[in-house]
Image (cartoon, rainbow, N blue to C red):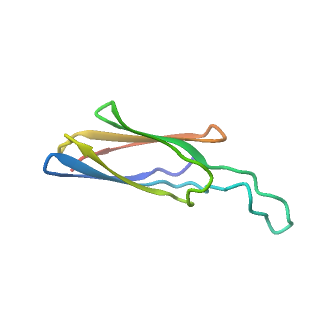
Amino acid sequence: MADPMRIRAQASGDKATVRVLMSHEMETGQRKDSSGKTIPAWFIQEVTATHNGKPVLSAQWGPSVAKNPFLQFNVKGAKAGDKIAVSWVDNKGDKRTDEATVS
């Protein structure tokens, strides 16, 4: 399983800004290793986020997203103490879910 995501959620007025740093190699399937063999594709395909259990974001990603991707989004109606959970699934079936509390 991948390293934990670093999630920061800060409330400002009637919304929260959520910043997520995901740890993932994100291989495109087009690079070659030192012996000339193609490195198999391995990338995050789906990202979802919830605010107190309700879906607020759903994204489909592909192999062109950079290694250790960064994601930022706003959640209307979020306030200090609320829970934000972010999940991803990659093309090999690996999954990761992490949660943060809005500050």
Image quadrant holding the N terminus, namely top right
- Report the side of 69 relative to 38 (left or right): left
Find the residue positioned furthest to the bottom.
34
Could you say where residue 77 lies in the image, as x and y percent from the top left? 19, 40
Determine the residue positioned at 70% across, 51% down: 41
- The x and y percentages for residue 94 are 60, 40
Residue shown at the point (54%, 47%) measured from the top left:
61
Residue depicted at 57% across the width and 54% down the height: 24
In this orientation, which residue lies closer to the viewer: 8 or 15? Answer: 15
Q: Position of residue 67 (x, y in %)?
A: 57, 60
- Number of marks present in the image shown: 0
User: Residue farthest to the left?
Assistant: 13
Residue 48 picture location, percent across and down: 44, 39
72 relative to 81, above or below: below
Answer with left or right where residue 58 lies relative to residue 93: left
Q: In the displayed structure, would residue 97 be above or below residue 62? A: above
Q: Is residue 48 left or right of residue 12?
A: right
